[in-house]
Image: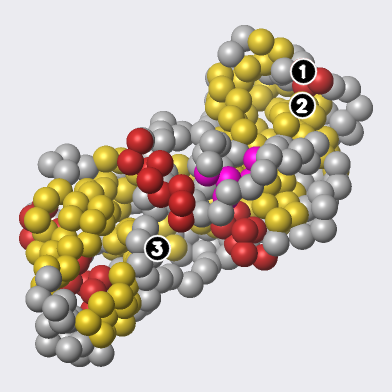
Amino acid sequence: MILPSPFRSLFLLYPTFTAAHFGGFVAHTSRECSQQLDIFSDGLQIPNNTLEINYSIKEWGSHAGGHSYDNMTFPGSASSNDSDDDAGVEFVYWKVDQPDPTCQYILMKDTPRGWQILNKLPGDEILRVSQEGCYYTAVNPNDNLITSYCCGTDDCAIAEIEIQHDEPTDTVTGDAPKCSLISHDSTPTVEDGTQVAVTLPQTCEAPPACTHSITQSRSFSTAISHFSSYTWTTEEGFDVSFEAGVDFFVDTKVKTGMSLSIAQSFMDETGTTMTYTNVTTTQEGGRQMMGTVAFYSFTPQFDCWKGDVSCGKDQDGNEKILHRISFCQPRQSTSGEPAGTYRMVYISG
């Protein structure tokens, strides 16, 4: 995914890690992982046919959340000749050693869209494991792949996309300040939102494959994203607290306070309104390879504007400006459904 230079200023928000080596994903031709598969990146064979796992999903100092392998090819792999959505897909199995306790290994697909505004993962997960074994993934020629790892409850919460986590909060002891947009991008960028599970994990035992139908309706909505926390006292004596993070205006919550005030300032300037979209049971289905455990996922796309917002004055009479706030609206397909990408995510049982 794209990593624009402004994001480099955000690196200090996350801890950095010394590069470690956790083995790798070793490519094989079949589910027994008895014969290695030659794999190539940018036309060069990868040593030992192994994608190294040596950067954490929270390592931002010199690597954007993982180890990237560009323009991957798998010339000796089996492939699907089906006429449906699986046409051209190549079957690759990865042998993985046992991760350390509390750790998980992650394999992702890169995309051409931005990710740092609404998402902490640099790609879409296709494989995440906490146990040694031989694991299947569906890949395409010329895919860009990213390896990574997480250790511990807090870090792995970023990778466990089938679990919903709390959003940041904003609090005001009185009326929220009225905010106004003082500068913003004239054209939005297309960003990937957080990849989410739309089915429960299931074990596939029926040859040749199992199907997934969406069982969890998921909502995607207008969002405010900000990477700095703010606390101040207004000119009227009200205390304001605005936490860093991504705040979605989902229809199950009534939003007030700072988030709503900031969102309204963007909507007034961009000519947009509060937007909600849903992935439902009628929209998509997916095929899962026999002998695997997996869930189906969806990564929504958003149009995002970045700008600076003035939210009145503080108790000393100084103008309170919140810098580089992102305002995002979910994109919709021509049919009115959420725009985005569906993927099968394989996991250890």
In the rendered image, the residue lying farthest to the right is: 34
Residue beneath the point at 51% across and 34% down: 110
Residue tagged 3: 245
Front-most of 15 and 104?
15
What's the residue type where badge 1 is placed? Pro
Cα separation, mark 3 vs mark 1, equals 39 Å
Front-most of 41 and 286?
41
Residue tagged 2: 50
**Residue 330 coordinates in the image, percent (x, y):** 30, 53
Say which quarter of the image contains residue 95.
top right
**Residue 239 coordinates in the image, percent (x, y):** 25, 85
**Residue 346 coordinates in the image, percent (x, y):** 69, 46
Residue beneath the point at 60% across and 25% down: 69
Cα separation, mark 1 vs mark 2, equals 6 Å
- Is label 1 in contact with label 2 (beta carbons under 8 Å)? yes
Residue beneath the point at 26% across and 46% down: 303
